[in-house]
Image (tube, rainbow, N blue to C red):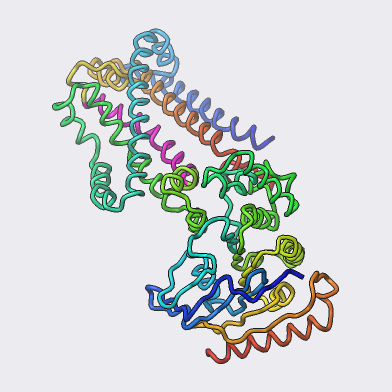
Amino acid sequence: MAAVNNHPIISLRNVGKTFDSGTVALDGLDLDVREGEFVSLLGPSGCGKSTALRIVAGLSAPSRGAVHWAVGDDMSAERLGFVFQEPTLMPWATVAANVGLPFKLVHAKESYARERVERALERVGLSAFAQSYPRELSGGMKMRVSIARALATEPQVLLMDEPFAALDEITRFKLNNDLLALWQMLKRTVVFVTHSVFESVYLSQRIVVMTPRPGRVFTEVAINAPYPRDERFRTSAEYAALCRKVSEALSEATAEAA
Amino acid sequence: MTDRVLRIGLPIGVLALGIVVWALVVYLNRIPPFVLPGPGLVFATLVKDWSLLANSLLVTLLTTFEGFVLAAIGGIGLAVLFNQSRLAEYSFYPYAVVLQVTPVVAIAPLLLIYLPQPAAVLVCAWIVAFFPVLANTTLGLNSVDHNLLALFGLYGASRAQMLWRLKLPSALPQILTGLRIAGGLSLIGAVVAEIAAGSAGAGSGLAYRIAESGYRLNIPRMFAALLLLSVAGIAIYFALSYLTYLALRRWHESVIAREL
């Protein structure tokens, strides 16, 4: 199991977000993300969990409150990897060029970039597809490329915005396992946004359940099952009980808001 | 395979049928050549007047090409400028539209007063051809995947990197569509200007030959010149389509052959 110290690497304090349309997406959101942990933000669609993630990434500015990074506020590819719901690949570029994008943009040395790209592709099992174009890949493979790109710079924090929501269940299970293996190997912090109870229980050490409209933290559920987790865990009574517990928390969170 | 044969064979069949009908109508009705020449006579004229017509064709093609290149540079350049500066877009885009919606036939005589004839013809070709490039490039630059934009921002891309590495490649299919339209329009602009200039005399392009032959009731030569113009237009279209194919074949849905 990856080391978790209690030091928060990211803290959100009383964060609120009101869109120009007047929609209050987030209100009074408090969240600490600890170094090395795998934490999920779970909530129904439209609860502002993606907005919260975008605010953490600096893609969107909070209307109220503050986001604090323990290591300073300078965003860079070494700090942060982001995986979108869609693979978000450049269709005109090969897989290798897509994964190498962060290095290209900072004019990194060619040999260094190539080595990092090769390693990242190897980690997601796509070494053989380095020279393919995204359209030649399946949905699951594109997502792997996207993850490889986010991991290529070995960022301290990996933010994932419902990355597997558009995939079929078989592919999703496979990628869940791959993601956990990578997380255990690299020991990075992962913040994972999802609307799937099953996915969040399977992956996380900690699940933050959010209320919809306005989004804020309803409760937290610790998932203490040991890693590595595999199909045995997915079919265990413990897993089923945890899913029921989280599911109930989610229903309460939704009911409270309605 | 059969689809391919039909695709190529059917238009050729229709062409052949059209020529036969045309020849028969002229022959059976004994229509005199100064009213409607038969296909044989048109072809004979094309061969007989080849040196004259070929020279004119070159003049027109050169103007078309220059107009096209300037339209490409101007259209893409303006679209990039508008994309980078909202102020520039608000200030100038309406005038680009005005230039487009004013019929070039109406502008040509004015231009001929103020500019030397070759320049006036070129400007006409440019005016007609640049707008589709501008409009399509603008569309392409504005339709970039917003997640990719966010990703580039996250990785600290500069404005220049956003443009060269993201926006322009992403807009390439639309830019090429604009260029494909511009190729044909550039020829039209050149022809319109040459016709307008025809009365001014000094012209020697293909359209000028048509006007001149018209005055002299040399109808077969009019048809021969028209035929050449039409072939030139088709050649331009196919050349640009092939360019599009070469540029996009590795990644864009529009040019990828699929098994259904």
Q: How many marks?
A: 0
Give residue B184's position: percent from left, percent from top.
39, 33
Q: Residue at x 58, y 86 (%)?
A: A218
Give residue A68's position: percent from left, percent from top.
50, 71
Q: Which sits in the foreground, B78 or A115?
A: A115
Residue A198 quadrant? bottom right
Answer with left or right where residue B67 lies relative to residue B40: left
Classify A81 as above or below B39.
below
Residue B36 seen: no
Give residue A98's position: percent from left, percent from top.
60, 48
Residue A16 seen: yes
Answer with left or right where residue B130 lies relative to residue A28: left
Q: Is residue B6 magenta?
A: no
Task: Give the extent of the magenta segment.
Answer: B171-196
Classify B190 as above or below A105.
above
Classify B94 as above or below B223.
below
